[in-house]
Image (cartoon, grey):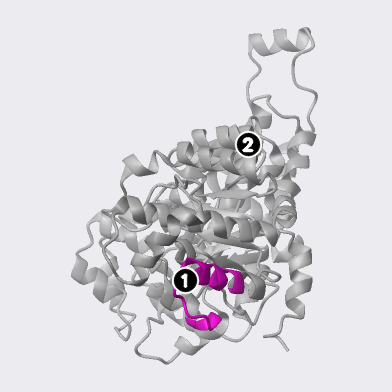
Amino acid sequence: MAEKGITRRSAIQGMGAIGAAALAGGCATTGVGRKMRAVGVGRPARPRDWREQIVRRVAETPLVDSHEHLLEEDNRLKRVGDKSKLDDWSYIMDHYLDSDLLTAGMPRKDHERFFAPGADPMEKWRLVEPWWPAVRQTGYGQAVAIALRELYGVDDLNAQTVGRVQEQYAALIRPGFYKKVLVDTAGIDSCQVNSLQRPFTESRQPELLLQDISFIGMHMGPNLDTYAPTAGIEVRNLADWHKVIDWWFEKYGPYAVAVKSQAAYSRDVDFAAVPAADAAPVMKRVLEKDPVSAEERKKLEDHLFWYCVGKATAHGLPVKIHTGYYAGQNRMPLDVVAKNPGSASRVLRHAIEKSPETRFVLMHIGYPYYEDMIALAKQYTNCCLDMCWAWIINPAASVQFLKHYLVTAPANKVLTFGGDYIPVEPVVGHAALARNGIARALIDLVDEGWLTVDAALGLVEGVMCGNGRTIFRLEEKKRAVKTAPWIA
């Protein structure tokens, strides 16, 4: 039995057709390959079971989960029996796969009915049945299908099995089910949660659900109503808003693992250095609800971004920035997304000059512009890349990203998993896709002669959990949250 409840058998099964082919097959030796070995450039001898060794090592290694939006377990338990909240088997499709269903052509009225609270869960199959074959092979669909198998024992979602899915969905949701899903089934060491409900969640499971400070509303807007009342500070000018930001970092900085902004959904990430003297007049007009131009708004946002980055650095917190693909549908401006790597490079360069100890974590591999992101990680000492979300956006491209990354940039600056989900159940499927992809990437690199077997095996612990533990100081943070004031 492997660690975290994952057996060698289930790991190999989870590799699917790709893994089976890798374990069973091998590359034919070409004439060029024979000649290379003759002059001492070829591959060293490999054990016959080297592919299986890589699969096993990946299966047995826990994952540090660097990014989730999970609700607190107590909040999920409160949904049970609440007819105003979605709480049936369709809920596990309600994040990300819901978008694929719409882009596949599911009518909006059927989509709304499928995800409506209180609707008959058995009737919902008829609504999704025409569209399931079109989305089940996408990363979003595969994550759900794997979760159905691993959590509910259902290999194929259809009219005959949907009743069991609903029964098992309801049976799973009991106190402690987050640990069962995340640790026992998915093999996850810990999660980092970026709450969508509040800037920082005082989690009741603080060592499992470690928390980011969400600073998007500190520098975008800014969002006075969310941050100022909790801090108990009346905001009359920019200096007062700085005090609000200071309050949040002083209160939660010791317990947070990072800070995170998804400002890239509404603007370019070209944050320029703007002094307080230039931002203060704009803040005054914002507070007085006077008109502010787009240029002025950017000036204020840029100043506040760097102010928050400074506070994060003072507390030793990495700065997570969304890059790349947009969630949802019919709203992704690729011309803006394409600028992310270039804009991020200027941010990284400015930080190197002014605050070299600041560490940035660029999220989601900048998909689909991931080659440019690899160039940033290779060039900039303050840049890490995070594969959170990537495995379900495009699992095949994510394999290529990891292969290219590992032969290009330092291996200690990549994070290979973050489920990025609100519901906890699909994290199981996403983790399985990540393990499959990590093993596939390493097997390919060995098979193609870029890595030795020992080198590939030696990379596993770092890229799956070691990097995350170091970058986010997880052991220190776990000790801190044990004595957090909201736990007593």
x, y (%) of residue 301? 43, 57
Residue drawn at x 44%, y 42% as measured from the top left:
340
Query: What amino acid is found at the position of numbered circle 1 in the picture?
Result: Leu
Q: Give whichever of 311, 385 is nearer the camera.
A: 311
Residue drawn at x 80%, y 25% as measured from the top left:
45
Residue that carries the numbered disc 2 in the rendered image: 380
- The image quadrant of residue 192 is bottom right
Of callouts 2 and 1, which one flags the residue occurring earlier in the amino acid sequence? 1
Numbered tag placed on residue 196 in the rendering:
1
The quadrant of the picture occupied by the N terminus is bottom right
Residue drawn at x 46%, y 36% as measured from the top left:
342
At label 2, counting other C-alpha atoms closer than 10 Å, the crowd grade (few under 14, some 14-19, many 20 or more) is some
**Secondary structure beneath disc 2?**
loop
Read off the magenta span.
Answer: 229-247
At label 1, counting other C-alpha atoms closer than 10 Å, the crowd grade (few under 14, some 14-19, many 20 or more) is some
Q: Give whichever of 29, 327 is nearer the camera.
A: 327
Query: What amino acid is found at the position of numbered circle 2 in the picture?
Result: Tyr
